[in-house]
Amino acid sequence: MGAEVVLTVAERAYHGKGDSVQLRNVTENDVDAYIRMRCDPVMMADLGGPLPPELQPDKTRRDAAEAAADTAWIKMVVPDPDTPDVVAGSVTIWSHDIDGGPASEIGWMILPQFQGRGLGKSAARALLEQARDEDRWGVVHAFPATGNAASNGICRSLGFRFVTELDVTFADRVLRSNHWTIDPRTDLQPT
Ligand SMILES: CC(C)(COP(=O)(O)OP(=O)(O)OC[C@H]1O[C@@H](n2cnc3c(N)ncnc32)[C@H](O)[C@@H]1OP(=O)(O)O)[C@@H](O)C(=O)NCCC(=O)NCCS
């Protein structure tokens, strides 16, 4: 069964601003997209390796609950509003401890068949525009692996500032990563 698409007024308003990409909250019906994103060795090469498929239904349910409660922004990327069941990936902002204090982090994933079309950048831009306009999340951090050209490309072209290179432990693996930050209220570059 396809995912039910319920867009808030704010999300509808963002359709168009992000180069025609549409974002909607994850729901528990998105488990198939979660498995395709999170259990694929290529997709997860810079994210600690593939995760077990059997854990994804529960992860999808927990993420859907967090998104519905608005404690994290966990959005599915819908490339074409005429086919809302077709999902290209996800973009997320959440809060957790970074260097001993609460901070906001953004992450993005675009499925292989949709990569290289600007969707990752558009989705990240749309979410950061929403953060700016709602004055939510403050300074947002990103930690792409140093060798992840597309992910670092998103940071560079949206106006993130490079902080430093560092080792990040992810799923028991140490990944050499770039630390980028953006304050969406002041740094976000125009399209
Ligand atoms: C990283 C990822 C989200 C990029 O999504 P995408 O939709 O393919 O990226 P875009 O098409 O929006 O491109 C973003 C920028 O990177 C550049 N880029 C894209 N692919 C590239 C590549 N293979 N090499 C170099 N630059 C690349 C684009 O030109 C663009 O920069 P520009 O605006 O200056 O032209 C996608 O590759 C992905 O999901 N990878 C697997 C999961 C992952 O690594 N997530 C990120 C963890 S930090």
Image (cartoon, grey):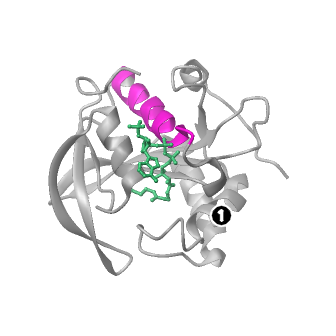
Amino acid at circle 1: Arg
Based on the picture, tell me whether residue 191 belongs to the magenta stretch. no
Q: Nearer the viewer, residue 89 or 52?
A: 89
How many dots with numbers?
Answer: 1
Give the prevailing secondary structure in the magenta stretch.
helix
- Identify which residue is drawn at 54% across, 69% down: 42
Quarter of the figure with residue 54: bottom right
Based on the picture, tell me whether residue 128 belongs to the magenta stretch. yes
Q: Nearer the viewer, residue 183 or 25?
A: 183
Quadrant that contains the C terminus: top left
Quarter of the figure with residue 6: top right
Q: As displayed, is residue 127 above or below residue 181? A: above
- Identify which residue is drawn at 41% across, 67% down: 46
Q: As displayed, is residue 187 above or below residue 50? A: above
Residue 59 spot, x, y in % from top left: 57, 64
Q: Which residues are magenta?
A: 117-133
- Identify which residue is drawn at 39% across, 32% down: 128
Q: Nearer the viewer, residue 90 or 5?
A: 90
The secondary element bearing badge 1 is classed as helix
> Which residue is tagged 1?
36
Residue 108 spot, x, y in % from top left: 46, 50
Farthest residue, direction right: 1
For mark 1, does the 10 Å Cα neighbourhood hold few (<14), some (14 to 19), or many (20 or more) residues? some
In the image, is 172 to the left or to the right of 23? Answer: left
In the image, is 26 to the left or to the right of 3? Answer: left
Residue 27 spot, x, y in % from top left: 66, 49
Q: As displayed, is residue 51 above or below residue 14? A: below
